[in-house]
Amino acid sequence: MIYSKYKKGTWVVAFYLILSSFGTTRPNTKFTILTTTGILADAIKNIVKEDANVVSLMGPGIDPHIYQTTQNDVQKLMNADIIVYNGLYLEGKMSDLLEKLSQTKKVYAASDALDKKQLIYEDVSLIDIDPHIWFDVNLWKQVVGFISQKLQEEKPESAAYYKDNTVAYLDKLELLNQEITSKIQSIPEKQRVLITAHDAFGYFGRAYNIEVVGLQGISTASECGLKDIQRVIQLIIERNIKAVFFETSVSDKSMRAVLEGCAGYKREVAIGGYLYSDALGAPNTPEGTYCGMIRANMITIVNALK
């Protein structure tokens, strides 16, 4: 399912239509699964291991909300055997292309694993849905199980192998879930306020009992204004909040304006650190994996607020 607000007819779709009209050929290669985000790629790598070539379009520090698809991306999408994307409008500017590709390719939205009642809506209109589902590890376990089932159906000869890998990974995720719950509870309840650049941590807050305040909304495609900045400044002053957090994939300009505003009220507020929100860390680092990213965020939050 695709939640799209952008008008159709972008150059990306036009480029796709031109290529598809001529047809494409490619040599026999290893089974390829293409994902939009590194977070999804990491989940799939834990399922298939070396049995497939897993490729992510977006690397470390990339903001998927405003990502611009390139001609090279389109070719990668067309050449993939399976495409997995987050959905819920996370990849907003790619929506038209993903919709077109789903007519001829195996294209799966990871968010289809979840019931609508499990989702967070930005307002009572029930239109704008928070796409950052990976921040609730229990929800992410459902996503992993859903993707695994689809891959088992697509490649039945590897189904038993995928299933065994999935069980092992789900056990690892459950241990992570328990660790987060325990660590967040160590923060005094009155100090459990997480202020970030955009509202990406709603699922984290709901799952682990920590209040979340975003300067921007659920998408970085919309900019915050002076009223948003002043709102957060007043909240910090009234509740004596000790730290705010930057994000690795979002500009820190607006959050620095909040800090400057607090200084004008003679209120010193610490920078709690940088959190991974919409993208993993660098490859070959702990933060370059889903578990490592979530754990790094947890440690940063606890150290700043405890």
Image: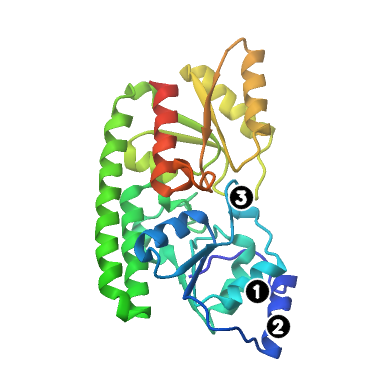
Mark 1 vs mark 3, foreground winner is 1
The residue beneath circle 1 is 75
Q: Are marks 2 and 1 in contact (CB under 8 Å)?
A: yes
Residue 143, label in figure: none
The amino acid pointed to by label 2 is Leu
Image quarter of residue 156: bottom left
Identified at 24% across, 60% down, the residue is: 167
Q: Is 90 or 249 nearer to us in this picture?
A: 249
Query: Could you tell me which quadrant the C terminus lies in?
Result: top left
At mark 3, the secondary structure is: loop
Q: Is 10 or 162 nearer to us in this picture?
A: 162
Residue 62, label in figure: 3
Q: Earlier in the sequence, mark 1 or mark 3?
A: 3
Image quarter of residue 15: bottom right
Q: Are marks 3 and 2 in contact (CB under 8 Å)?
A: no
Identified at 51% across, 47% down, the residue is: 280
The amino acid pointed to by label 1 is Gln
Give the Cα separation between the discs numbered 1 and 3.
20 Å
Identified at 50% across, 77% down, the residue is: 81
Classed neighbour count for the residue bearing mark 2: other residues with Cα under 10 Å, few (<14), some (14–19), many (≥20): some
The amino acid pointed to by label 3 is Ile
The residue beneath circle 2 is 19
Q: Earlier in the sequence, mark 2 or mark 1?
A: 2
Vertical arrangement, residue 183 with respect to residue 174, above or below: above
Give the Cα separation between the discs numbered 3 and 2.
27 Å
Vertical arrangement, residue 36 with respect to residue 241, above or below: below
List x then y, in percent, for residue 197. 58, 36
List x then y, in percent, for residue 8. 68, 72
List x then y, in percent, for residue 73. 65, 67
